[in-house]
Image (tube, grey):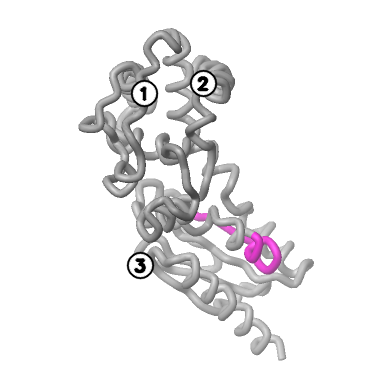
Amino acid sequence: MAFFSMLLFADGETIYKNKCAACHEGYIPMGALKENFVEFNNTKLKLKAPTLNQLSFRLKQKIGDPKGDEEIHMLEVVEFVKSYIIKPDKQKSICMDEVLEAFDIMPSMQGKITEEESEEVASYIYHFDKQALKAHAPVYVDIQKALTEAKKEDKLIMIKAASEHCHFCKKMDREVLSDKEIRAVLQKNFIAVEVDVYKEDLPLHLSYKVTPTYIFVTAEGKKLKSVVGALSKQDFLKILETVKQIKKGDTK
């Protein structure tokens, strides 16, 4: 079933590019999208319609059971999309109010897309969020590799203590850690380690109270700082700069 889903994903990408991409852009980080709609009423990005990653994320949150069986959940989302694109209805939209206010209701695609094509593109939309998030996430390595690389490259280590169903972990992943500027700072100055605290213990005898917690340590494993919860992009950049300054003082 998973192999079949990925075949639909590949075919759906082609259909999406041919029939949807003119209006629905592919990927824009959630932090930038939030700023565009909440603060600028879409006057900053001037989008024609919700982006693909917006649709993918909202569909999986609003249709069916996001914590249930993935294949069943995908089928629920596929059926909703197939129905919606033929009979668009603003009352049934899964978009946030501030996003809906920026757009008119989409035109019906009846006669413009076959049932098989709509199924394939819906499968593509369903899987896109997970694929895009992975593609735009920092590069995570295990702690032993992190210690070796940090010492070799004179970098610090950022250990992310997270969990699979943590709302604020996902918020940070989508709105902050996927941001291009954040990723550039991390790549230049840090080695990143991700730990699902419900599946394994934190390394170096470290501890946490809530998820997400971001713990910064030296290449020798000395803890420099930890921060808890979901922060804004600017606040997280300040944290990274603060840790870099602590490192400079620590190595004098």
Q: Residue at x 70, y 65 (%)?
A: 188
Q: CA distance from mark 1 to mark 3?
A: 49 Å
The x and y percentages for residue 125 are 45, 28
Side of 62 relative to 119 (left or right):
left
Q: Which residue is tagged 2?
A: 19
The part of the image, by quadrant, that contains residue 132 is top right
Q: Nearer the viewer, mark 2 or mark 1?
A: 1
Is residue 189 inside the magenta stretch?
A: yes
Q: Earlier in the sequence, mark 1 or mark 3?
A: 1
Q: CA distance from mark 2 to mark 1?
A: 12 Å
Asked if labels 1 and 2 touch by Cβ distance under 8 angstroms, the answer is no
- Against 192, residue 244 (above or below) is below
Q: Which residue is tagged 3?
A: 209
Element class at badge 2: helix
The x and y percentages for residue 223 are 55, 77
Residue that sits furthest to the left in the current view: 91
Q: Which residue is tagged 1?
A: 107
Report whether residue 197 is seen.
no
Q: Which residues are magenta?
A: 184-197
Q: Earlier in the sequence, mark 3 or mark 2?
A: 2
The foreground one among 194 and 18 is 18
User: Local crowd at mark 1 within 10 Å, few (<14), some, or many (≥20)?
Assistant: few
